[in-house]
Structures are given as C-alpha cells and as structure tokens.
Image: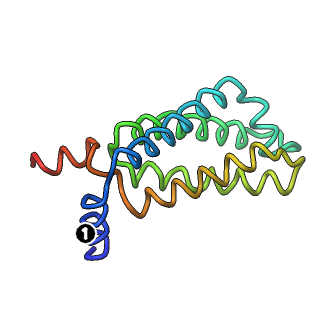
C-alpha cells in the first residue's frame, strides 16, 4: 500500500497535460475498439475459437466488447483507471497471442502492443491530477 501511495504522490507531482492527453487517447482507443467489436461479434467469436460450437466464444466476445466500451469511458474521464486497465490486461495479452497463433495482422499487433505498454504505464502511475479520481480524492 505504501508503494502505491508513493507512486501516486510522484505521479501527481510530475503530471502534465501530455500524460492526460495520452490517458484520454488510450480511453478513446479502447472505446473505439469496443464499438468496433460490438459490430463484429460473430467474427470476433470465430477468431477466438474457430472450431467451437458452444456459446463460450460468443460470451467472451461480448465481454471483450463491453469491457473495452465501459473501460474506455472510465479511462477517458479518469475514474477507476487502474481497475479499468486491470480488466483490459487479459484482452490485450489475448490480442497479442491471437496475432502469433493465427494469421498475423501487423497493424493489430502493433496496436495491441502499444495499448499494453500505455496501459501498463497508467496501471503504475494512475490517472493523474486532471481526473475524476483526483478530484474525488481531494474533495473527500
């Protein structure tokens, strides 16, 4: 717990508008991917498990779409940022793995790796000074 408090203090002391823009860009990217996946649920389910006929890949595809959609909104405003990003981790790692096991889409691989790196940064640093989390913490 002391480590997280120390990281929060460091992040709030060194935060800038550039980091907030990066956080908002990550949130917009996740939100956009959520909308994109919601429109292509069957294709996503086939990508996850091409030979399964049960409902698991379809349920997983819906989880991915809704997690990106809701997590993107929360990351954009900076509310529960670390928790939202923690829910994105299995999806981003899965996106990287799918690119190596199936047909490799270089652009999707680069997007997944970049999103994972930026998500890891905000998982460590937090949402920053210009966020709902910081405002709620200061007004409590």
Q: Residue furthest bottom?
A: 2
Q: Nearer the viewer, residue 122 or 62?
A: 122
Residue 131: % across, % down: 29, 43
> Residue 116, relative to residue 131: is it above or below?
below
Label 1: element kind? helix
Q: Residue furthest left?
A: 140
Q: Nearer the viewer, residue 39 or 14?
A: 14
Label 1 neighbour load within 10 Å: few <14, some 14-19, many 20+: few
The quarter of the picture where the N terminus appears is bottom left
Q: With 131 as the anchor, is 104 left or right in this view? A: right
> Residue 3, relative to residue 49: is it above or below?
below
> Residue 5, relative to residue 21: is it above or below?
below
Residue 16: % across, % down: 33, 50
Q: Residue furthest top?
A: 39
Q: Give the color scheme: rainbow, by chain, secondary structure or one colour.
A: rainbow
The residue identified by callout 1 is 5
Q: Quadrant of residue 14?
A: bottom left
Residue 38: % across, % down: 63, 27
Number of numbered discs: 1
Q: Nearer the viewer, residue 59 or 110?
A: 110
Q: Quadrant of residue 8?
A: bottom left
Residue 40: % across, % down: 72, 27
Q: With 19 as the anchor, is 139 left or right in this view? A: left
For the point 66% across and 57% down, which residue is it?
A: 93
């Amino acid at each position: 717990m002391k480590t997280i408090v120390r990281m929060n203090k460091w992040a709030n002391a060194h935060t800038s508008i550039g980091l907030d823009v990066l956080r908002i860009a990550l949130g917009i990217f996740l939100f956009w991917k959520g909308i994109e996946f919601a429109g292509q649920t069957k294709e996503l389910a086939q990508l996850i498990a091409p030979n399964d006929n049960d409902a698991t890949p379809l349920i997983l595809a819906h989880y991915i779409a809704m997690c990106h959609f809701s997590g993107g909104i929360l990351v954009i405003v900076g509310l529960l940022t670390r928790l939202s990003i923690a829910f994105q981790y299995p999806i981003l790692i899965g996106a990287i793995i799918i690119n190596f096991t199936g047909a490799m889409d270089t652009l999707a691989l680069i997007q997944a790796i970049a999103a994972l790196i930026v998500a890891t940064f905000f998982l460590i640093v937090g949402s920053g000074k210009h966020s709902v989390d910081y405002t709620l913490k200061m007004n409590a």
